[in-house]
Amino acid sequence: MKTSIIGYPRIGKLRELKFASEKYFRNEIAQSELFDTAKKLRTENLTEQKNSGLDFIPSNDFSFYDGMLDTAFLLNVVPDRYKSLGLSPLDEYFAAARGYQGEKGDVKALAMKKWFNTNYHYMVPEIDDNTVLKLSDNKPFELFTEALDNGVKTTPVIIGPYTFLELARYIGTKTKENFFGNITDAYIQIIGKFVTLGAEWLQLDEPCLVKDMSREDIEFFNSLYTKILENKNGLKIRLQTYFDDVRDCYKEICTLDFDGIGLDFIEGKKTLELIEKNGFPCDKVLFAGVVNGKNIWRNNYEKTVELLKSLQNKSINTVINTSCSLLHIPYTLKNEVKLSDTYKKHFSYASEKLVELNEIKKIIETEDYCNLPEYTANIKLFSEERSGCNTNVKEKVNALSEKDFTRLPVFSEREKIQKEEFKLPLLPTTTIGSFPQTSDVRQTRASYKKANISETDYEKFMKSKIAECIELQENIGLDVLVHGEFERNDMVEYFGECLDGYIFTEKAWVQSYGTRCVKPPVVWGDISRAKPMTVKWSTYAQSLTEKPVKGMLTGPVTILNWSFPREDISLKESAYQIALAIREEVLDLEASGIKIIQIDEAALREKLPLRKCDWNKEYLDWAIKAFRLVHSGVKSETQIHTHMCYSEFADIIEDIDNMDADVITFEASRSDLTLLDVLKAKKFRTEVGPGVYDIHSPRIPTVEEIKSAINKMLSKVSYNKLWINPDCGLKTRGNEETVQSLKNLVKATKEIREEN
Ligand code: GLN
Ligand code: ZN
């Protein structure tokens, strides 16, 4: 059996590409220097893969920003507003990625969207009626040749035509069908070029095949590839899928003239079943995704070998593959210097996955592999009792019953009680939580982390910031205040650090979009609250004012979705454990006199399964319950808020209502307000605060603008259910614009109150 990967991280082990790109953006280095860095990183990757014994080595998985954007440029799907700037090719590319503001013009970036069920974001290709789709870039061919010059005949990787057309945005009257001829011609040309260059394989990524497909979708896919594969000219084509199974089009895939088919056995719940039921064509190679490309745990060789042997027994020509591109995990454990080996021996980042692939190959090829040291070591690893077990937490989760997920009295009664309790004006004004994290805040936090300032001094500083923030909000005239979140760098790490069962890495950076990387913490063991997390800050803030101050927490689903989860227990179980920990904090806050508590679920939607039929049973069933578990124990007068960073939840509106929060705030200023129609139609009972202005831009909204947004909202939401707030937290904004924007928000609200 041979080995393969689908793609490799490209940002650099120490984020070299990020730093070089950012220098280039600031005009600190020339294009040539950026190109040199990129080439060095590609060569490093290539050498590492070659030395690991990997058989199928990819090329063109490198990108200066994003693979979808690269494909758009490859196919000439570049809106005129970028072309007409007259920039160099690289700058035109970056203009589409990040927007451009300078001598040559002022244009916004392409839209950005989450890549399937990952925290990676792709640039959305934009197609209008004038778009002439044609082959117009050389990058895949140049990178193939570059690797060939380094002695490796790679498998070039390109996003396939079906996924490209599916994910593109059509802003004119044309639809994907109109591009059938041009896109098939372009891919046939791509094939032709690779044949000339001497390639053996071409990998076309088609992750859209794992989503729900209609009859028309399947036919469209079928006709695209029937045409393309008639023109293979001897090049072998691998159809690569990932993130789930291909149940809707498995038969078509098997019938089409592909030479290889890549299937995901990790997230593809039905992949094995599809093969067992329908067989696998003997003239094709199965690239079996058995090593998880999305998580950082070591592979369980016993299970993997069993699966591979069963494929072998079916006489399927199998290549050992990762489940998806390794883009979604960090580079190497070698840079985790501080993390103890107790943990590290269970982990496998991208370069360790290469070793695993090779070991699995060796095991498969060895007759009595049971005595191979690689195998026995792995068996031992998985049979050992791991630290981090907490029977108390496990028992608590096991003992949960319906009443633990149910808050009483019911919403409508609580709403009355709370109106009495708080006596807030109509259209209460509030913010989402964070206030500007100015450099003094960041610096002080960093000094404290490095133990350069004492705990006492740190606390003093934080309290002075909180006091300033409360005074500011009182002066502005907001109704429900916040403490400002100065103590936290992000929404997960801060809480993770206060929880037992979490561990943190040093260099485990993963690309989120462009030059932005995240460093997700790891759920190592059973989770419990080690110490109160926010009580100190919230109670101090409350002691300074008569107005209610919101306690501010991150919800269990968001904490879990922005971490590397465990593989030895279910996501549901981890979510309930985290929920129980946050619940303790909620009850502590309540007992300390905090009357309103906001539990953010910014990432609730992120891990929604790719197929609708899995939404409930695989995810929402426990995700919504985890949230309910957090707050079901509070008194009726305690008001629970939640917040989401997007407004695309029309399709799960009942589930959102079922979270049973008293108030939900969400992003709405950049979207049309169609969600509000849905809220009305579905008789949404939770009170709502759709953001009245966009905090992602430094622009100050005028009073008139905000009034018109509120009036629009009032035409759809009843007067006594509407809250007035910005879109999201203010931490990335400057002080001045924040104060002015909030003043305008309060003024607009007061004027509307008077007018009604
Ligand atoms: N409470 C958080 C803040 O204001 C919410 C952030 C978010 O939704 N991403 O920063
Ligand atoms: Zn938000």
Image (tube, rainbow, N blue to C red):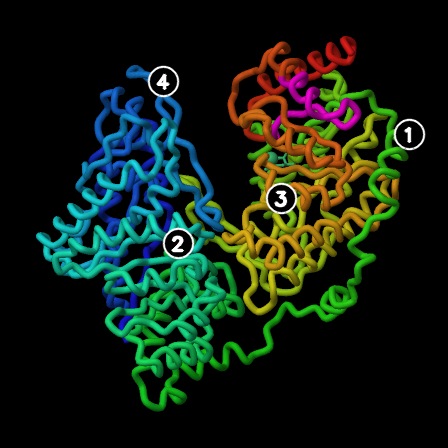
Query: Does any portion of residue 79 appear in the rendered image?
Result: yes
What amino acid type is highlighted by mark number 2?
A: Leu
What amino acid type is highlighted by mark number 4?
A: Asp
* Above or below, comparing residue 741 to residue 276 in the picture: above
Q: Is residue 615 left or right of residue 128?
A: right
Residue placed under numbered mark 1 in the picture: 420
Of labels 4 and 2, earlier in sequence is 4
Residue placed under numbered mark 2 in the picture: 209
Q: Is residue 301 left or right of residue 464?
A: left
Which of the 4 image quarters holds residue 428? top right
Q: Residue furthest left?
A: 196
Quarter of the image with the N terminus is bottom left
* Above or below, comparing residue 79 to residue 390 in the picture: above
Residue placed under numbered mark 3 in the picture: 652
Q: Secondary structure at mark 4?
A: strand
Disc 2: CA contacts within 10 A as few (<14), some (14-19) or many (>=20): many
Q: Nearer the viewer, residue 99 or 606?
A: 606
Which residue occupies 61% across, 28% down?
727
Mark 4 vs mark 3, foreground winner is 3
Q: Is residue 422 left or right of residue 239?
A: right
Q: Secondary structure at mark 2?
A: helix
Residue placed under numbered mark 4 in the picture: 106
Q: Nearer the viewer, residue 528 or 717?
A: 717
Q: Nearer the viewer, residue 488 or 152?
A: 152
Of labels 3 and 2, earlier in sequence is 2
What amino acid type is highlighted by mark number 3?
A: Ile
Of labels 3 and 1, earlier in sequence is 1
Of labels 4 and 3, earlier in sequence is 4
Where is residue 135? Give x, y as percent.
19, 39
What amino acid type is highlighted by mark number 1?
A: Glu
Question: Is 708 a magenta residue?
Answer: no
Q: CA distance from mark 4 to mark 2?
A: 37 Å
